[in-house]
Amino acid sequence: MFDKTIEKLLNIKYPIIQGGMAWISDSSLASAVSEAGGLGVIAAGGAPGEIVRQEIIKTKQMTDKPFAVNVMLLSEFADEVAKVVIEEKVPIVITGAGSPEKYLEAWHQNNIKVIPVVPSVLLATRMEKLGVDAVVVEGMEAGGHIGELTTMALLPQVVDALKIPVIAAGGIADGRGFAAVVMLGANGVQVGTRFLVANECTVHENYKEQILKARDTDTIVTGRVTGHPVRALKNKLAREFIKLEKNGASIAELEALGVGKLQKAAKDGDVAGGALMAGQIAGLVCKKQSAKEIVEEIYNQGLEVLKKYC
């Protein structure tokens, strides 16, 4: 039913990639997803190289399956992390917030597959010209930092423009979403919000409960005026952002308000003053499960949907 392009490229059983969520996607979650047959991802976020190294080492102790590191290219520690993934022989790197061109040759020389996250056709075609191995096309339904195009509108345009494999992200939490993006030409999917409530996810239980209680209209986008919009669940912090934006606050004021707020939510469990980043699909996430159950359920449901309609 599926072309197995991503499975062969990444040496995984299922074409399901766990999203790289800063302060959330650690060795516990990444190893569990990889053990389940998907691709687990460690999020480097803004962490120093040695912190990322420790997560890589712990992941290797928990699984012998392939996993990836998500490298945030705007991080002040990006150079350190870029070296660490080479030294630790990480097989796959997923990049965000910039172009991986600076590191691409060194990564490829060390047999590392490079997959950037892109929000537009223009950036996708630029990445293909650089020689990346695949792209993650992320629609604005996703949680965290987002672009302006929806997954359904963006994905088929990128598929038509590229020859390399395309992975869809944004608004995918079950087998129906999986089947839908496959029909639009995706070779695989990246899922973030649903893995927030995986048993192996170490995010604070307060955060998980907010995801489980979320309804379809419970996310909001803030920070558009900064050029780096973020989707999160509505709470006191989000309302403060919206108030500042309406009152014409400076970019510096808005950025200052956001500093450290994801950590407050993910690690401290502050669901009022922390940034509860989540996708619009949060309203579909209604139960805690193991990573294995999530991966297999998404894949098997998707297969059944495609068999029914194809």
Image (cartoon, rainbow, N blue to C red):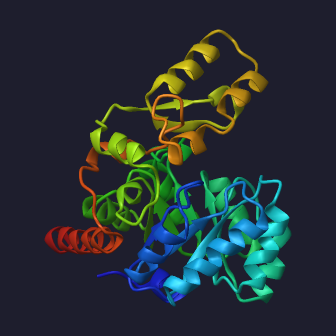
Residue sitting farthest toward the left: 308
Q: Is residue 299 left or right of residue 58?
A: left
Name the residue nearer the viewer: 71 or 156. Answer: 71
Residue for point 77% across, 67% down: 49
Q: Is residue 126 above or below residue 207?
A: below
Is residue 115 visible from the viewing direction of this image?
no
Name the quadrant of the C terminus: bottom left
Name the residue nearer the viewer: 122 or 22. Answer: 22
- Please identify the quarter of the rendering in which residue 189 is found: bottom left
Residue sitting farthest toward the top: 247
Q: How many marks?
A: 0
Q: Is residue 125 left or right of residue 300?
A: right
Residue sitting farthest toward the front: 268
Residue for point 17% across, 67% down: 309
- Please identify the quarter of the rendering in which residue 100 is found: bottom right
Name the residue nearer the viewer: 173 or 302. Answer: 173
Residue for point 58% across, 42% down: 262
Name the quadrant of the N terminus: bottom left
Q: At which x and y percent is residue 131? A: 73, 76
Is residue 185 visible from the viewing direction of this image?
yes
Name the residue nearer the viewer: 152 or 245. Answer: 245
Q: Is residue 278 above or below residue 118?
A: above
Residue for point 66% across, 82% down: 90
Q: At which x and y percent is residue 115? A: 63, 71
Q: At which x and y percent is residue 198? A: 36, 62
Q: Is residue 109 above or below residue 223?
A: below
Q: At which x and y percent is residue 159? A: 51, 65
Q: Is residue 189 left or right of residue 302?
A: right
